[in-house]
Image (spheres, helix red, strand yellow):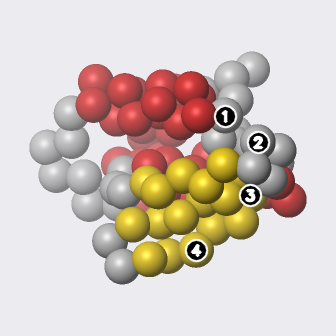
């Protein structure tokens, strides 16, 4: 995840607003993106560890692994998440 001090996060009904100070852009995201950001935390996780933690922490039901990874890739593209 981007360094926590570079993000300002606010809940807005069904959306979560994430202001990225480094870019000056505010992103409006919906589930599962906020959950992914919260789960990644400061330390970060591998993709497989992230999926396992999401499954343990949230009721994902029949969550599609490919869809979750696509949301993760979108967060990387916005700069809210970085890869190692």
Residue located beneath label 2 in the image: 23
Q: Earlier in the sequence, mark 4 or mark 2?
A: 4
Residue located beneath label 4 in the image: 10
Question: Cβ–Cβ below 8 Å for labels 4 and 2?
Answer: no
Q: Which corner quadrant of the image does residue 1 belong to?
A: top right
Q: Secondary structure at mark 4?
A: strand
- Say whether residue 80 is left or right of residue 74: right
- In percent of width and height, residue 60 lies at 25, 52
Question: Cβ–Cβ below 8 Å for labels 2 and 1?
Answer: yes
Question: Cβ–Cβ below 8 Å for labels 1 and 4?
Answer: no
- In percent of width and height, residue 26 lies at 61, 55
Q: Earlier in the sequence, mark 3 or mark 2?
A: 3
- In percent of width and height, residue 24 lies at 75, 49
- Calculate the distance from the C-alpha at mark 1 to the C-alpha at mark 4: 18 Å
Q: Earlier in the sequence, mark 2 or mark 1?
A: 2
Instruction: Say which mark, if any, is on residue 57.
Output: none
Q: Which corner quadrant of the image does residue 51 belong to?
A: top left
Q: Earlier in the sequence, mark 3 or mark 1?
A: 3
Q: Look at the image and tell me whether residue 48 can be seen.
A: no
Instruction: Say which mark, if any, is on residue 7.
Output: 3
Q: Secondary structure at mark 2?
A: loop
Residue located beneath label 1 in the image: 79
Which residue ends up furthest to the front in the rendered image?
24
- Calculate the distance from the C-alpha at mark 2 to the C-alpha at mark 1: 8 Å
- Calculate the distance from the C-alpha at mark 4 to the C-alpha at mark 2: 17 Å
In front here: 27 or 47?
27
For the point 68% across and 23% down, which residue is it?
83
Q: Secondary structure at mark 3?
A: strand
């Amino acid at each position: 995840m981007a360094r926590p001090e570079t993000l300002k996060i606010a809940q807005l009904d069904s959306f979560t607003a994430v202001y990225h100070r480094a870019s000056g852009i505010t992103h409006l995201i919906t589930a599962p993106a906020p959950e992914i950001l919260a789960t990644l935390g400061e330390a970060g996780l591998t993709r497989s560890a992230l999926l396992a933690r999401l499954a343990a922490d949230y009721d994902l039901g029949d969550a599609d692994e490919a869809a979750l990874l696509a949301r993760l890739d979108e967060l990387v593209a916005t700069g809210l998440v970085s890869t190692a």
